[in-house]
Image: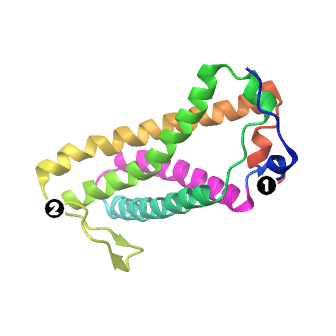
Amino acid sequence: MTAPATTPSTAATTPRRYTRTAMLLHWVLALALIGLFCVGLYMTGLPFSPQRLKLYNWHKWAGVSILVLSALRLLWRATHRPPALPAAVEQAMPGWQKLAHHGTHTLLYALFFAVPLIGWAYSSAAGFPIVFLGLWQLPDFVPVSKDLAEAIKPWHQCTAFAMAGLVVLHVAAALKHHIVDRDGLLARMLPWG
């Protein structure tokens, strides 16, 4: 199957690189997710203490921030066309890789929202409201219920680990394209590329 011919008008309207804003949102969100995941792993192993409570509050604030960043990123992506895969890359990719490429991105976007929303629901059900930055109390997402909290808790952990696995897969694929294939795909998301 050959790629459709690119006319001068479509070549001019299809960007070759992500916008600076898309790059900024991508890298800020990536660093925030990695940091938040590591803090989440660390804090759950701590004994009950002021430090643990402080980290839990910070974790909640960061989760709300990630939720807002994810909404901004999705809005930006919906209003600014991302670059299509280069024709040579598209032709060289087997069908399963194209499916994995699109599936990974779709699942990541879904988890950008699911993980913090499930965390918010867990915090609400456990009776610990989120007071963003210690200033604004957010509304409870669900009613206080110990049974509901126990039911929700493993979902936050499972979805967080699923997202971590997809992030590792995403990074591995990007490095494969950069180091093995040398096809310039990663450079589209690098500010200095």
What amino acid is labelled 2 in the image?
Answer: Pro
Residue located at (28% from left, 40% from top): 154
Of 1 and 166, the residue lying toward us = 1
Residue located at (40% from left, 60% from top): 55
Where does residue 175 sit, x and y in percent of width and height?
Answer: 72, 33
User: With respect to residue 114, does 120 lie above or below?
Assistant: below
Q: Is residue 3 visible?
A: yes
Of 71 and 27, the residue lying toward us = 71
Please say whether residue 182 is one of the residues in the magenta stretch: no
Question: Magenta part of the protein: which range?
Answer: 19-48
Please say whether residue 30 is one of the residues in the magenta stretch: yes
Residue 41 sits in quarter: top left
Which residue in the protein does label 1 denote? 191
Which residue in the protein does label 2 denote? 143
Q: Which circle's residue, 1 or 2, is located before the other in the chain?
A: 2
Residue located at (67% from left, 53% from top): 81
